[in-house]
Image (cartoon, helix red, strand yellow):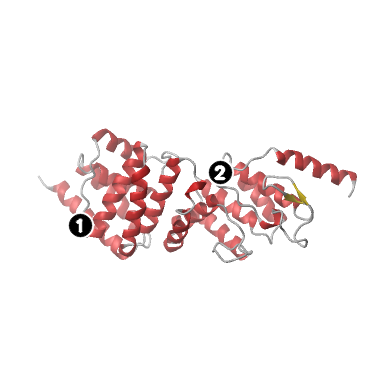
């Protein structure tokens, strides 16, 4: 090895020795693991996945570590790094995974879903088959979000079933409740056959929800799911006026609280409609109208659409009544 190459490797090792991955991000690519076969990599080196492999994959491992650590604080920067790695390593799935995660972080779900598919085409195995590339719990959540936001309800629901067994990856209890609520929403989108599953998730959220917003979210979603299961309009949720109006304001916002579940905006408005009904029929009707309009523009499950239209008709009638 030349003196210049040796110096570069020493510099990279020193830099990466100080890096730490967030909780839930511990999965590392096999090519960066100590047990990687000789044809994949050479002798181990210290790095953010405990070891970084020498040539020919050391630069890929270093780049992946840098991009993953940057993801939480600078998604656009992580996206740029991931795309650069994708150009340098066009046959590898790992840069595509980071690209997909950065895209969902900046709110581009269709592009994120396309990047996930590109990673699968390059050998990423998102199932549980032996030998599959390890994927962190946080990466799996990003995959579920991309699926949910692009209409792949069945895929999202299946991934959330796996994620609720990996809750230790989220030490913040608010993020655990967020995951339960996202899982419930994924089940609700699939209609009548998944409503019991949705209620199970919501009861899990209810038992641990401490923040005002998450308690309200859980109460509203429970009212929606139970009403759809019973085939009738939801009972107005028992929430005090100030809490209900605050939830409406936050649900309407383009930037809701960071610890809230990531859902399409019209689904937040549906929950807000249920929470505010006892205080304002007009507000509840307006919020629900926005939900039904957005729902009709997608490809909703038939029972969900029928339920949404029935409640819209009831709210319109109540609004027009003396």
Horizontal side of 20 relative to 43 (left or right) equals left
Q: Nearer the viewer, residue 242 or 316?
A: 242
SS of the residue under disc 2: loop
Q: Are marks 1 and 2 in contact (CB under 8 Å)?
A: no
Q: Position of residue 320 (x, y in %)?
A: 14, 48
SS of the residue under disc 1: loop
Q: Position of residue 230 (x, y in %)?
A: 22, 59
Residue 156 lies in quadrant: bottom left
Q: Residue at x 62, y 46 (%)?
A: 68
Q: Position of residue 71 (x, y in %)?
A: 59, 44
Horizontal side of 79 relative to 33 (left or right) equals left
Q: Which mark is residue 232?
A: 1
Q: Position of residue 78 (x, y in %)?
A: 62, 45
Say which quadrant the C terminus sits in.
top left
Q: CA distance from mark 1 to mark 2?
A: 42 Å
Q: Which mark is residue 23?
A: 2
Q: Is residue 320 visible?
A: yes
Query: In this rendering, which labeled residue sits more in front, label 1 or label 2?
Result: 2
């Amino acid at each position: 090895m030349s003196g210049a190459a040796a110096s570069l490797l020493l510099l990279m090792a020193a830099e990466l020795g100080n890096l730490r991955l967030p909780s839930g991000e511990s999965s590392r690519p096999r090519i960066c693991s100590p047990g990687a076969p000789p044809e994949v990599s050479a002798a181990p080196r210290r790095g953010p996945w405990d070891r970084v492999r020498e040539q020919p994959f050391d630069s890929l491992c270093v780049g992946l570590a840098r991009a993953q650590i940057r993801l939480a604080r600078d998604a656009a920067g992580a996206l740029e790094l991931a795309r650069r790695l994708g150009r340098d390593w066009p046959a590898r799935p790992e840069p595509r995974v980071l690209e997909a995660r950065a895209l969902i972080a900046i709110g581009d779900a269709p592009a994120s879903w396309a990047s996930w598919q590109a990673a699968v085409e390059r050998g990423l195995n998102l199932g549980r088959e032996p030998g599959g590339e390890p994927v962190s719990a946080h990466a799996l959540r990003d995959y579920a979000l991309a699926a949910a936001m692009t209409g792949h309800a069945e895929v999202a629901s299946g991934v959330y079933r796996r994620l609720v067994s990996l809750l230790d990856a989220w030490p913040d209890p608010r993020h655990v409740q967020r995951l339960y609520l996202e899982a419930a929403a994924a089940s609700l989108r699939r209609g009548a056959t998944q409503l019991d599953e949705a209620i199970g998730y919501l009861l899990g959220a209810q038992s641990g929800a401490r923040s005002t917003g998450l308690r309200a979210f859980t109460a509203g979603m429970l009212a929606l799911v139970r009403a759809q299961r019973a085939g009738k309009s939801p009972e107005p949720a028992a929430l005090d006026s100030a809490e209900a109006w605050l939830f409406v304001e936050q649900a309407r916002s383009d930037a809701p609280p960071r610890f809230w579940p990531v859902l399409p905006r019209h689904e937040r408005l549906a929950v807000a409609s249920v929470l505010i009904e006892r205080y304002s029929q007009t507000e509840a009707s307006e919020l629900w109208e926005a939900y039904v309009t957005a729902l009709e523009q997608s490809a909703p499950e038939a029972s969900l659409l029928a339920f949404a239209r029935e409640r819209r008709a009831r709210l319109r009638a109540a609004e027009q009544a003396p």
